[in-house]
Image (cartoon, coloured by chain):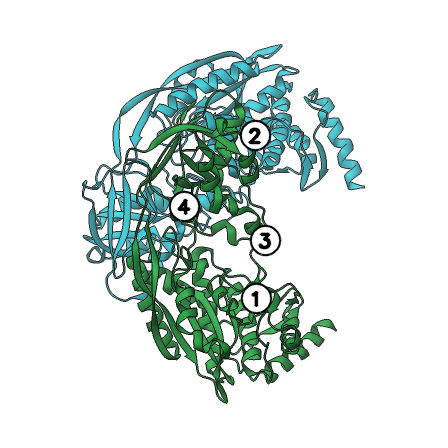
Chain colours: A green, B cyan
Amino acid sequence: MRRVALRVVSVLVLSSCAAPSRTAHPPVASSSAGFDAPDSGAIELVRSLSDEVGPRLAGSPGDALAVAWAQRTMTSLGLANVHTEAARVTHWERGVERGAITSPVAQTVALTALGGSVPTAPEGLEAELVEAPSLEALDAMSDERVRGRIVYLHAVMRRAVDGAGYGEAVSARTRGAIAAARKGAVAVLVRSIGTDSSRAPHTGQMRYDDAVTRIPAAALSTADGDMVHRTLARNTGPVRFRLTLGCRALPEADSANVVGEVPGTDRAQEVVLLGAHLDSWDLGTGALDDGAGVSIVLSTARALLTSRPRRTVRVVLFANEENGLGGGRAYAQAHADELARHVAALEADAGDGHVLRVRWAGDPAHHGLFDTLASRLAPFGIARDDEPAHGGADVSPLGERGVPRVDLVQEMARYFDHHHTANDTPAVVDARELDRAVAAWTVAVRTLADADTDLGRAPPPTH
Amino acid sequence: MRRVALRVVSVLVLSSCAAPSRTAHPPVASSSAGFDAPDSGAIELVRSLSDEVGPRLAGSPGDALAVAWAQRTMTSLGLANVHTEAARVTHWERGVERGAITSPVAQTVALTALGGSVPTAPEGLEAELVEAPSLEALDAMSDERVRGRIVYLHAVMRRAVDGAGYGEAVSARTRGAIAAARKGAVAVLVRSIGTDSSRAPHTGQMRYDDAVTRIPAAALSTADGDMVHRTLARNTGPVRFRLTLGCRALPEADSANVVGEVPGTDRAQEVVLLGAHLDSWDLGTGALDDGAGVSIVLSTARALLTSRPRRTVRVVLFANEENGLGGGRAYAQAHADELARHVAALEADAGDGHVLRVRWAGDPAHHGLFDTLASRLAPFGIARDDEPAHGGADVSPLGERGVPRVDLVQEMARYFDHHHTANDTPAVVDARELDRAVAAWTVAVRTLADADTDLGRAPPPTH
């Protein structure tokens, strides 16, 4: 009975959304935990960006190749008004990176510089290791224990179906160098913020504080972090470590956001913005982060082209999300006069997983459209979540200016096995999951773009 | 009813084996699919060898460290007659390794030299890629298609619970260089023989034929192999590849097998040999391959020490299993006069998994002891397998001389995700699975070492 009922609802949703299928197999909700989605072709876009562009850190040669790829791809998909919009971006290069325990037993470890780290001297540095289980524990340690040493932060990330462990653990990476340098450390090593058991270290952005000495910062692979942890726990004398990082910051570079549209019909001046980021970290080929998001928003736009919604659906592939947010800031600035006509912004930057929940941030008095949205997504097993939407990093500057955000919260249980590592390639992207995400996005965006009402203006973000 | 019956059998097995438990929790067969094993301490031996020695390829500095570790560890566990036995071993070093697609789009790939490969010229070599899906397909290709090119063998390994996919796929690695060079190829690249989706390439031994030109041979990670495969399939013109390998063969080196015993009682002159290999490939720390096997045989011996069996149980940690078998040959030669008193040889070289099946190779007229063995293992969910035992690589020279082998076939579904890669570290070893393997080994070895009968002499191996 439940299956039959859901199929009826599903047909109603599809027809009320006026979303003719591109394929012979329209999405059918078959249970509250899953549904069969049509082949959206989304995996081919991930493979194309990963294979034909590859790594594309802001300011690198790959960054420029990615901008060209995005223009070419949007045009071939049939989007209108395809163009680039200039953005100034952070430019940082990795260079050589080596690390090893030198005593009590020599062991080479797998590590990678954190994004933005200063280098070591060319010959590297060597010092005794001291471990802290958390930033809080480090803050509580005496300067004497830390001074002149390399701090190892044994921050173990929790696996969670929605990736919630990341937010809990990531401050060890972003703030570790500041906390360690305050106590006089000469470098900081962080156990990779990830859920795998591999030798592939996870890079990611870190910060300095102008009032504190800038020290080199690197992530050990989770396997190597655990080895360092065990070696220290054996308590057989001082554990010394040698670190060499050749990374460097360069002057800001020129890059671009790439924009394309599904032009609206009778409300074309109003915009539903679909964002993802075009840049990637340099270790992998950016298939999950954010090739999957790029593919979700492009595939959603492609699906909508077959029957254009009332409002304009604008795809923005942002530059420099990973290590500077230059693209997000440039868009908000260039479109300041138009933001009042942005009725919603959504960002896909959570990999290939199906959608678990939907949440929003808008005017509470305009809840009617969110009620409709949630009810249309329910047959796909997508839960209504009344926590405020975060929006992605790129659309956060829009949220600060009152643009409502809608979050389609994705399943991320495996995402942080590969996030920001060399393993982020199409080999770890699940084509069927990606199709399920695209199907949900298509229903959601059509609902937002066709509605008689809107979400009002959003209150200032609380975080 | 079944659970109750099994527990009764289990208690009988344990008491008939006179194997007092070292811990408060003796192994209890709780279902045909699994049982709770006591904490054997086996994981600590894996961690110690991995962390305190690490990579230990034959002839390398780690090889000598491993020999010292094994003597120290056997002595501290209480084994008797701990000593080394000299073995001459293959010595090969890796050196620099780099690979990249250079056109149509530049993409760096993750690869590693196969063990024994010759180097490229120091500046590397560059040539067009040509793909073959298998050795058979390569053999069928015209010389014109292959000559002057780099062959890519897209050999995709199948995941199987007992690791059976390895034997099906591995010839692409071992024989690829010969087959490609026969057609005039300048190098061969093999998709890693593994079941993962990562960037960690799998090394492993390869062969040359004295009648065929020796060409450089490397494994691409599975993810990179798939990328090369897709790039060729896009058919957008020649795909060129640049390969640099700095590996080299050195003269044979000195190493040693390490031997220790649980002395027998009234049949001490008869030997049950437990083998594992002490060497490892150089990319990881050899935790699964073969730290787990080393730990299984040492933990089994430790468990037997509490109540010595009638026959002598001899642990042999072999040198140079991975790339030469110098240790296995040296043992068979040094002990030639004693092999008639070797009543069984078992080798642990299949990772950390629990035991699925038991099989043997001996005199068919002596099946009584195997019947007993199989019946004592049945309560642990271990199936009788009437295929002939293979024995491990190190004990194969013993099999050729009539020593019966017993195989305790382990679960290997995940083993080939990590085999011969940088990811082979304690982070991927399952302590509870290892305990289950040790519990089964202990029952099996006690049965063989205490029996009134034996397995006779084995017929010559058929493979």
For badge 3, the amino acid type reads Ala
For marks 3 and 1 on the same chain, the one whose residue lies earlier in the sequence? 3
Question: Which quarter of the image is occupied by the C terminus of chain B?
Answer: top left
Q: Are marks 4 and 3 in contact (CB under 8 Å)?
A: no
Task: Assess disc 2: are there few (<14), some (14-19) or many (≥20) residues with their C-alpha within 10 Å of its C-alpha.
Answer: many
For badge 4, the amino acid type reads Asp
Q: Quadrant of residue A323?
A: bottom left
Q: Secondary structure at mark 1?
A: loop
Please determine if labels 4 and 2 lie on a single subunit.
no
For badge 1, the amino acid type reads Pro
Image mark 2: chain: B
Please determine if labels 3 and 1 lie on a single subunit.
yes
Q: Is residue B389 left or right of residue A322?
A: right
> Disc 3 vs disc 1: which is toward the camera?
1
Image mark 1: chain: A
Spatial CA distance of label 2 from label 3 is 30 Å
For marks 4 and 3 on the same chain, the one whose residue lies earlier in the sequence? 3
Which residue was labeled with disc 1?
Answer: A460
Question: Where residue A119 appears, x then y in whole percent?
Answer: 33, 41
Q: Secondary structure at mark 3?
A: helix
Residue A59's place in the image compared with B202, above or below, is below
